[in-house]
Image: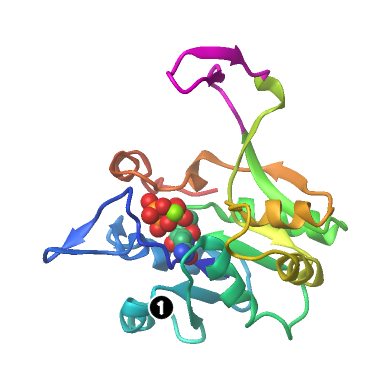
Amino acid sequence: MVVAAGSGVRLGAVRAGRPVPKALVEVDGRPMVTHAVEGLLAAGVDDVVVAVPREHREEFAALLPAGVTLVVGGDTRTASVRNALAQCADGDGPVLVHDAARPFTPPAVVHRVLAALAGGARAVVPVLPVVDTTVVVDDDGQVTGEVARAALRRVQTPQGFDRGTLLAAYARVTDGGPGFTDDASVVRAAGVPVHTVAGDELAAKITVPHDLQRVVRPAVQA
Ligand code: CTP
Ligand code: MG
C-alpha cells in the first residue's frame, strides 16, 4: 500500500491559492504518488492500494495506473494505513507499507525488504545510520546529553510485514493512541521482532520545501 492521504503542511504547497496535498506535488515532472506507485509496481509488487485525501480522490484516480485500488485516508497516518489494510485482509503474501513522500525509492530497497520477509522475518524496515552527532536538549534548548550514535538508525519505507502479523497488530491499537509514526512501531508494540535491512538516501522522505531541491531522481538508478 502507498499512504498518500496527508496534507503536507510542512511542505506548504499551494495551487491557485489552495493547499495541495503533498502526494500531488510534482517532482521530476510527475506527482510524487505516481513515482511511488510505479516504483512499487516496477519492483514486482502485484497489487497496490493507495490511501488518498477524500476531497482529492478524483484527481488521484485520474493519474494512477488502472488496477490500483483507492481508499479514502484518515486524519492520521495510522488511520490511513488502517483504511488501506481493510482492503488487504483477504489476500495472501506479505504486505508493504510505503510513503508517497518517498518517490525515488530504488527498487533494490524494495527487493531487500521482500528478501528478508521471504527469509522468515515477520516485520522488516529499511534503515540508514545517523551520521551527525546527536544530542538531547531540555525545554530551553540546552544540551543535556549526547546519544551514542552507533546504535541509532533512521527508518524509511517501504516497511514489509507478514500480512496476518500486520493485521493483528493494527487490531490492537487505536488511531488516537500513542501516536505511532510508522508501522513497525505498531507491530513492535504487539511484541513482534522487527528486522532491519539497508535503506538508501534516495528513499529520503520529502517533508519540507528544501527537500524538493535535495531529492532528485538520479540519471541511472540501481
Ligand atoms: N499520510 C497519510 N494520511 C495522513 C497523514 C499522512 O496517508 N493522515 C501519509 C502522507 O501522505 C505521506 C506519509 O503518510 O506520504 C508520511 O507522512 P508525512 O511525511 O508526515 O506527510 P504529511 O502528513 O502529508 O505532511 P505534514 O505532516 O507536513 O502535514
Ligand atoms: Mg504528517
Q: Would residue 36 be seen by someone viewing this image from the given angle?
A: no
Residue 19 coordinates in the image, percent (x, y): 23, 63
Secondary structure, mark 1, is loop
Q: Which residues are magenta?
A: 129-148
Mark 1 surroundings: few (<14), some (14-19) or many (≥20) residues within 10 A: some
Direction from residue 13 to residue 112 in the image, left or right? right
Identified by mark 1, the residue type is Leu
Residue 126 within the magenta-colored segment of the rendering: no
- In this view, 63 is above or below 27: below
- In this view, 172 is above or below 222: below
Direction from residue 88 to residue 116 in the image, left or right? right
Residue 219 coordinates in the image, percent (x, y): 39, 47
Residue 140 within the magenta-colored segment of the rendering: yes
The residue that disc 1 covers is 64
> Residue lying furthest right in this view?
120
Q: Nearer the viewer, residue 21 or 27?
A: 21
